[in-house]
Image: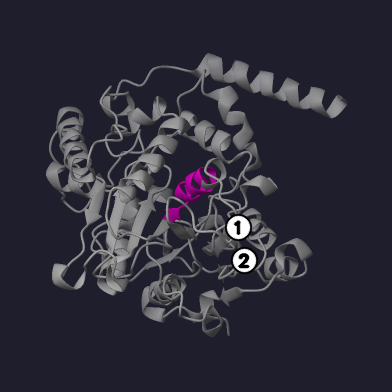
Amino acid sequence: MKFQSMISSSVLSLLALLLLSACGSPEKYLQPTGKSAFVPAQEMNFSTYVEESRRNIEEVLKTVRGEGGYLGGYSTAEAAAMRSPFQLMPSGQQQCQPGTAKGQRGFLLVHGLTDSPYLLRNIADSLHKAYPCGLIRAVLLPGHGTVVGDTLTMKKNQWKEIVEYGVKSFQKEEGITELYLIGFSTGTSLILDYLKTHPSPIQERRDDAIAGVVFLSAAVKAKTDLAFLAPWIRPFKDWESIFAERDAARYESFSFNAVAEFYSLTKPLDEPAYLPHVPMLMALSADDATIDAQAARKLFCSAGKLQRNTLIWYSSLDPQINTEIRNDPTLSCGNIIERTPSSFAPQYKTLNMAHTALPVAPDDEHYGVNGRYHHCKEYDLGKTEVAFKACQQDDAAAVYGENKKLLESERKLDQKYFRRGTFNPDYEYMMQAIFCFVDQSCPMETLIR
């Protein structure tokens, strides 16, 4: 009781301080637009949803931001296209008849918090190339895609509704007998929630045809233990951090409402009732600075060896962390593929795997190693514009990784500019694992070596 009293006192003191410091944000992009990404009616076809969403995003961006202002020189129309939901239709229609082996698979992609469907575009393109008869769809979470001010009013229930819409959209398509849900970060939280609220007996074919899930940077719990404070803080203070919003594909500022809704969504996910009863492929970085990777690994091990369950684990730069994980019985189980940072190809200059890196290919035109945008927010603090520009432009003196303080403590930066990883140097291996997971005739054991 004494400890709880101390916590309550600290929280009240913090809230009082926030109340005194709170003030409105005059910048238009930090204010709700009233035209946030919407949840369509269930009867709206997916093509109409995609087009209306893109049109709404472009209109909002033009009204609030005008033209341009993005690193990489993108137009407003280009930014709107990057942020919009999308679908890739089956190609080669003569070979992709409903009911045939080539016409059975659907893929629903769900992005993360403050992100957009663009973060999963490479995954979609790779799937489309591997499964030209597949139907691939990516939804946009309400509050995302327009301007970051719309995160002030978004609610987790709206996110749940768009996932429900996405799943049901496949039920209108003939020949989709296998549906795979692919989530990045908060997208994995929403998929876990969907499976919990739409239960089905283990080993039985589900009515919604879900045959497996792929979780990238799985968000079971926030990295910080202070996330529980966000619901208390948001009535008094809007922003946890504010940046110039120069990324054409996603938001860079972070609202307390976003944190609070994420915390509310993920709070129960470590309960046994949320274990997915469908095959699961998970990929995690031990050094992830956004989500608690060990909590996600624990969930994976708790699920047991259900059918084809497999975890790709990118180990830490810190040997002590790796040893502690291997010695923890709750984190030790079969079907784990361990990949080390030392195995990354040197041309990618990646020191360890970042949360933001997993779903993106190294040759991506926006986030790739030679892309038009580099994540240099460590230097985007208003007083270090010279360093920020140098980080963006000086490829020879830049390296990629997760968490600048961690890399400094491990003496890895060596006076180089730190770019948070926005692409996966192990992307091709990860995709081969996803293909094997989807091709149920492929033995997953061949990947574990």
Q: Is residue 386 positioned above or below 333 on the image?
A: above
Name the foreground residue: 276 vs 73: 276
Residue at the spot x=53%, y=43% of the render?
193
Residue at the spot x=57%, y=33% of the render?
264
Numbered badge on residue 228: none
Specify the amino acid type for callout 2: Leu
Q: Residue furthest right?
A: 2
Q: Nearer the viewer, mark 2 or mark 1?
A: 1
Residue at the spot x=34%, y=29% of the render?
150
Q: Secondary structure at mark 2?
A: loop
Which corner quadrant of the image does residue 132 belong to? bottom left
Name the foreground residue: 445 vs 416: 445
Specify the amino acid type for callout 1: Ile
Image quarter where the C terminus lies is bottom right
Q: Is residue 319 positioned above or below 378 on the image?
A: below
To which residue does mark 1 refer?
Answer: 202
**Magenta-colored stretch includes residue 185:** yes
**Magenta-colored stretch includes residue 270:** no
Q: Residue furthest front?
A: 99
Disc 2 vs disc 1: Cβ atoms closer than 8 Å?
A: yes
To which residue does mark 2 refer?
Answer: 306
Taking the image as shown, residue 161 lies to the left or right of residue 351, namely left
Q: Which residues are magenta?
A: 182-194
Q: Position of residue 94 (x, y in %)?
A: 14, 71
Taking the image as shown, residue 54 lies to the left or right of residue 112, namely left
Q: Position of residue 388 (x, y in %)?
A: 34, 51
Q: Is residue 386 visible?
A: no
